[in-house]
Amino acid sequence: MTVNERMYALGSKRSEIRELFEYGKKRIAEVGAENVFDFSIGNPSVPAPDCVKEALAKLVLEGDPVALHGYTSAQGDAAVRKACADYINETHGMNCTADDFYMTCGAAASLTVSLNALSTENGEVIVLAPYFPEYKVFITQAGMKCVEVKCSEEDFQIDFAAFEAALNENTKAVIINSPNNPSGAVFSQSTIEKLAVILNAAQEKYGKDIFIIADEPYRELVFTGEKVPYIPCYYENSFVCYSYSKALSLPGERIGYIFVSPTMKDAGDVYAAVCGAGRALGYVCAPSLMQYTIAQCLEDTADISIYERNRKLLYEGLTDIGYTVIKPDGAFYMFVKTLEEDAFKFYERAKNFELLLVPSDDFGCKGFVRISYCVDTKQIENSLPAFKALYEDYKK
């Protein structure tokens, strides 16, 4: 083969989610959108807040077009990074500066850059299942080993016995995602505090730094009234990989940042490694127009009340039918227990009822499907008879 075999394998086999999304588009063309219940992909269904439109209009109509569409510094515009720092300081009580932020093309780029900045020979990165499947791709591409630790299926908090058993002298980092894709679970303050204690003890035991990489595209999407613990407030060696895809409903604009906590040991060196990884991977000069836009919208979010309404309708509808559902605290995903052990077989059977659900195997656990409820509320209402018919089909 004249091309990289691993890249060929990744490119020739699309993710289950993307394949299902494409299948949904095909079925919609065949039978009509009103007859297909596509819950496959986490694409925000609410518009960006007005501040985005207003900021864009002002920038385009009144700004200097040469500056507006020109290169910024490789790590991002200094004024934009200062705005991000000021917001984090005010919101979370940190003491950071513009020099702790690296602007990126969204959370995926942030994760990839952070992992490459930390990459060492024989390095291992712990992921907490269920987890976003691309973590394994990013970790492997950075030259490290992905180590899965399953969370408790009761509430999807960390199983600390399993977590401590996975720690060793090669552990380089832990990726946490709260609110979680795919379960919607939010790690509690007590969970994060215990995680910090265990990792600090492990650092002492092995005489090396272990990092938390907090993947936070869903931070603002919380429905319980509780605040999501901000990791750098609890653990010094922390990265935050943030994206505005979900909070501002801008997934196609690809804009986010890496925050290298100033409390981190050798934070300056780590930040330099982040800049170096960004350079090596070609992730420099995030889109300038979107940098300037988000700097004016840091305190705003899209209307998440729609997701909260969808969550309530879907949870109550499914549990009334008889499904076992893990009630999500945030994000816009719901984990539903399958009616047979094999999630793929359940997913295939659900397709007979035009229900497009993502099987949990690729998320690192078995026996569930993920439902993305970032859809029109009418779709949820119309899908409930199909969910009931599927349930009754299993009870025959």
Image (cartoon, rainbow, N blue to C red):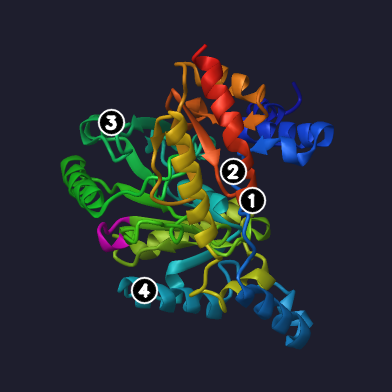
Residue that carries the numbered disc 2 in the rendered image: 380
Q: Is residue 1 left or right of residue 298?
A: right
Give the percent coordinates (x, y) of residue 334: 47, 40
Stretch of the chain drawn in magenta: 232-237
Is 125 above or below relative to 63?
A: above
Gap in angstroms between the C-alphas marked 4 and 1? 32 Å
For marks 2 and 4, the one nearer the N-term is: 4
Dot label at residue 376: 1
Three-letter amino acid code at disc 2? Ile
Of residues 252 and 185, the one drawn nearer to the viewer in this rendering: 185
Residue that carries the numbered disc 3 in the rendered image: 166
Give the percent coordinates (x, y) of residue 314: 50, 43
Confirm or deny contact between disc 1 and disc 2 (CB under 8 A).
yes
For marks 3 and 4, the one nearer the N-term is: 4
For mark 3, does the 10 Å Cα neighbourhood hold few (<14), some (14 to 19), or many (20 or more) residues? Answer: some
Please tell me which residue is depicted at 31% across the width and 59% down the height of the picture: 229
In this orientation, does residue 334 appear? yes
Name the front one of labels 4 and 1: 1
Is 48 above or below relative to 41?
A: below
